[in-house]
Image (tube, rainbow, N blue to C red):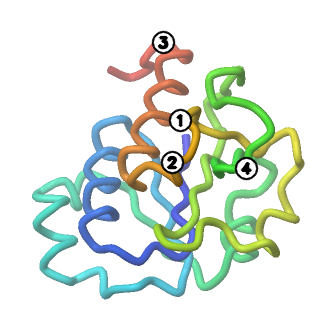
Amino acid sequence: MHVILCEPEIPPNTGNVIRLCANAGATLHLVKPLGFDLDERNVRRAGLDYHELAQVRVHASFEACRGALGAVRILAIETGGSRPYTDVRYRADDALLFGSETRGLRREVLALIEPDNVLRIPMLPGNRSLNLSNATALVLYEAWRQLGFAGA
C-alpha cells in the first residue's frame, strides 16, 4: 500500500507516520512543500530508527506523486468525505491520501479524486479532525486488516 501526506506541516506527525509505514510495510510519499526539513530532529526522534526501514519518497507536487504512482486507486481521507473509511474494500496497491494538519487537502487536489473515493473518519458532531498520524494509523491498519495483514 501507499500513504501520501500532502504538504505535511508538523515534524513529529511525519516521524510517527514513517514509523507506522515501516511497521505496516507501506510506502510513504511526501508531497512538497513540507513544513520542515526531513533531517529535522523532531522527525528523526519520532521515527527513531525506523527511517531506514521505511520506504519514503518525496515529490515536488501532487501531480508528480500521481505520475510516479501510475494507475493506482487514490483514496482521500477528508472530514467532508462521502462515506466512512470502513465501507471500502481495500486493495493491496491502494494509495491513502491525507492533507496537511491545518488545512486538509487543497480543493485543487480534491478535484482530482473521484467523489466516491473521498472517505471520512466518523467523529462526534462539532469536532474538527483527528491528529494526522492517528488518522493515518486508523485507515492504514483497517486496509491492512482487510488484506489479512499480508507480510506480517
| Numbered circle sitting on residue 148 | 3
Gap between marks 4 and 2 measured at Cα: 12 Å
Kindly indicate whether the residue at mark 1 contacts the one at mark 2 (C-beta within 8 angstroms).
yes
Instruction: Give above or below for 40 relative to 96.
Output: below
Kindly indicate whether the residue at mark 3 contacts the one at mark 1 (C-beta within 8 angstroms).
no
Task: Find residue 67 and report its horizontal and vertical position in percent.
Answer: 76, 68
State the residue at coordinates (52%, 63%).
5
Gap between marks 1 and 3 measured at Cα: 26 Å
**Which of labels 4 and 3 is toward the front?**
4
Helix, strand or loop status at disc 1: loop
**Which of labels 1 and 3 is toward the front?**
1
Number of numbered markers: 4
- The residue tagged 1 is 123
Gap between marks 4 and 1 measured at Cα: 11 Å
Helix, strand or loop status at disc 3: loop
Residue type at the position of mark 2: Asn
Kindly indicate whether the residue at mark 2 contacts the one at mark 3 (C-beta within 8 angstroms).
no
Query: Badge 2: how crowded within 10 Å, few (<14), some, or many (20+)?
Result: few
* 16 relative position to 150: left or right: left
- The residue tagged 2 is 127
**Which of labels 3 and 2 is toward the front?**
2
Query: Badge 4: how crowded within 10 Å, few (<14), some, or many (20+)?
Result: few
Residue type at the position of mark 4: Gly
**Which of labels 4 and 2 is toward the front?**
2
